[in-house]
Structure formats: structure tokens, C-alpha cells
Image: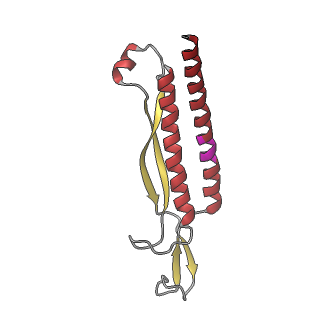
Amino acid sequence: MNLLSSMEISASGLTAQRIRMNVIAENLANVQTTRTPQGGPYLRKSVVLEATPAEDFQNLLTTDWTSPAEKVEVVEIVEDGRGLKEEYNPGHPDANQEGIVLLPNVNPINEMVNLVVTSRSFDANVAAFNASKSMALRALEIGK
């Protein structure tokens, strides 16, 4: 693995974590949203990540690594319709005939924990990227 592929791996992690942070922020912003354009309450969203080879196939064939380096990619963002909360509030404009309002399935505490984990993963990828950049710059200085 060369320095450029290590930077590519770190950059893919940065992109994935940025998308996760955006989705978590959207979840937190919609904790009380009972009506969406699709109808019904807001549904919590999650990011699905997948590991993919960091190098092209030809390079993998010529490498004798037992486990090639992999980068991360966002496969999809899924909505989770399970666990909607029901609240009795007959005066609410979105209440049904029995006075029940469906509330989003977003738990702010869980989202904040996910945000901290995602933020730390982002920071780790920044540190790895900066270490690779520093090594590349030092290698260029050796050639002087």
C-alpha cells in the first residue's frame, strides 16, 4: 500500500462520517415532526456503510497481501419505521379519531451518542490523513 492509497482510505472514511453526521443532524432536527411530505411522522434514518477494495483489481492481482486494504462507501440511507411513539393528544392537528398522535422514532440521547462516535471516527480519519501527508512531505524532502 502506498501513501496515496492510505490517503484515499482516510478520505473515504471522512466522506462516510460526514454523511453520517448529516443524517444524525436531520434525525435530531425532526424529533417532533409529526407530518412529512410523504405523510405520517418522520422516520429515523440510518446510514449503511460497505467496505470496498481501495485499489483497482489489477493491483490486487499483483499484490501478495493476504487481506487487501479497503475503503468505506455509503451504500444507502434507510428509513426505520419501527418503534413509532403514540401519544394521546386529542387537540393536536395530526391526531387520529381516537386522539392518538404518532411521533417519530428518534431518541435524542441515542442520536447524541451516535454523533459523538461519528465525530471521533471523523477525527481519527483526519489524524490518519495528516500522518500520511506528513510522511509524503518528508519523503519529498529526502529527495532534495
Q: Give above or below for 47 relative to 134.
A: below
- Residue 46 percent location from the top left of the image: 49, 53
What span is in magenta?
Answer: 117-122
Numbered disc total: 0
Query: Which part of the image, by quadrant, shows the C terminus?
Result: top right
Query: Which SS type dominates the magenta stretch?
Result: helix
Residues 74 and 110: in front is 74
Residues 44 and 14: in front is 14
Query: Would you say residue 48 is visible in this rendering?
Result: yes
Query: Would you say residue 105 is visible in this rendering?
Result: no
Residues 8 and 66: in front is 8
- Residue 33 percent location from the top left of the image: 51, 72
- Kindly indicate the quadrant of the structure image that contains residue 127: top right
- The structure residue drawn at horizontal position 52% and vertical position 79%, both measured from the top left corner, is 101
Residues 46 and 83: in front is 46
- Residue 19 percent location from the top left of the image: 49, 49
- Residue 90 percent location from the top left of the image: 54, 88
Residue 121 lies in the magenta stretch: yes
Residue at the front extreme, as displayed = 144
